[in-house]
Image: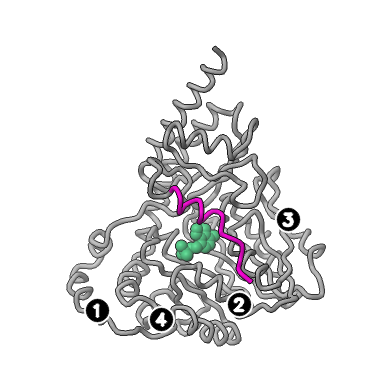
Amino acid sequence: MQPTPFKLERYFAQHEFTARHLLCSSDPESMSIGELLAFEPGSIDALRETWLGYTEYPGAPALRRALATLYENVQADEIIVHTGAQEAIYSFMHSMLAPGDHMIVHMPGYQSHYSVAEAMGVKVSPWKAREEAGWALDPDELETLLTPATRALVICAPHNPTGYLPTREVFDAIVAFARKHNLWLFSDEVYRGLEYDIADRLPAACDVYERAISLGALSKTHGLAGLRLGWIATRSAAVLERMSTFKDYLTISNSAPSEYLSTIAVRHTEALIARNTNIARGNLSLLDEFFARHANRFEWHRPRAGTIGFVRLKQGHAEQFCAELLERTGVLLLPSSLVDHGDAHFRLGFGRRNMPEALAIVDAYLDATVTSTAS
Ligand SMILES: Cc1ncc(COP(=O)(O)O)c(C=O)c1O
């Protein structure tokens, strides 16, 4: 059975390279290969020398050694590199779940967290973020979602699309629940590192729970989506074994030039995080003013991490609002129907340097629509 089409990706396939201004992208500002290589003098020559044969199937050793430094209790051989986080999600679901299993998934969320498993015959229960509480999760609800067939819990923190970051207490309660019921905890941490206050950073799930799988990628925190580089980190030998075997039917091994460039990126994680959180923080202060000015139209919970937020329209429908905005201004927002969450919200992305220009266009558009409605 085919998974249902990935609505968000189909929308980006249609608009990402034609819309004049992207205001809903989740990935931060990217950079050229030249800018990345500038982090390490001499790396241009090494790139030229990079051998274009197959690389080692779990990922180049130097890359996995660099990735292991991002964790406290995980070693290089407990990491499997994938082609983007997306491949790792697909592989985890197929490797560790079976038809008839049940899984609890943080929602609204990233569609592959539930559609891949549903297509396999896995039953999915949504664990719903509570908008009234700033999109918070309530761990007390977890016991009510459990069934005898529950095998896995999927969370995403910092969260796409709401920007929610659990407190340490909530995170610990999630881990305790997973441990009590012996569940796989699939923890999508692709935005981890983009906390505006470093004191808010949560531990990686794989560091604190032996049946956790932490999902990482260079697409978000590092802003390097074009490298198509993701990974899982886990202390579970069963997961490592089954996901390695499954990868033989996917990409086998990664792209050698990408692994070389990725190794440089991972070695400069702190600098890339500083760059990307600075851009997000600056854009957020403009968004604070924007939402204060348009409080009659929108409701917004300011994220504590990441590059995206989820905004409620106080009147009207999100699909119509986004379609009209795109048609009249060329600014792309993402209506919530594309993340299976009604038609009253849209996703906003604020990780790009040109966000102020796009926001100013929306501002002028809103002022003009008020005037034209009033006249
Ligand atoms: C929460 C989340 N997980 C995974 C992915 C996929 O990442 P990648 O581009 O590395 O495949 C995305 C991309 O938008 C995402 O937002």
Magenta highlight range = 1-15
Assess disc 4: are there few (<14), some (14-19) or many (≥20) residues with their C-alpha within 10 Å of its C-alpha: some
Q: Where in the figure is residue 209, as x and y percent of width and height?
A: 63, 75
Question: In the structure shown, which secondary structural element does the residue marked by tag 1 occupy?
Answer: loop
Q: Residue at x 57, y 60 (%)?
A: 5
Task: Give the residue pinned by disc 2.
Answer: 94
Report which residue position mark 1 lands on: 50
Residue bearing the label numbered 3 = 138
Query: What's the residue type where badge 2 is placed?
Result: His
Q: Is residue 196 visible?
A: no
Q: How far apart are labels 1 and 3 at the CA level?
A: 48 Å
Decide which of tag 4 and tag 1 comes sooner along the chain: 1
Please tell me whether the stretch drawn in magenta is mainly helix, strand or loop: helix
Q: Label 4 sits on what residue type?
A: Ser
Residue 253 numbered tag: 4
Q: Nearer the viewer, mark 4 or mark 3?
A: 4
Number of residues whose C-alpha sits closer than 10 Å to that of mark 2, classed few (under 14), some (14–19) or many (20 or more): some
Q: Give x and y (percent) for residue 103.
A: 71, 69
Q: Specify which label sits upstream in the sequence, 2 or 3.
A: 2
Distance from the alpha carbon under mark 4 to that under mark 1: 15 Å
Total label count?
Answer: 4
Q: Secondary structure at mark 3?
A: loop
Amino acid at dot 1: Thr
Q: Is the CB atom of the residue marked by disc 1 within 8 angstroms of ligand 1's nearest atom?
A: no
Q: Choose the circle earlier in sequence order: 1 or 2.
A: 1
Q: As shown in the figure, which amino acid type bears the numbered disc 3? A: Asp
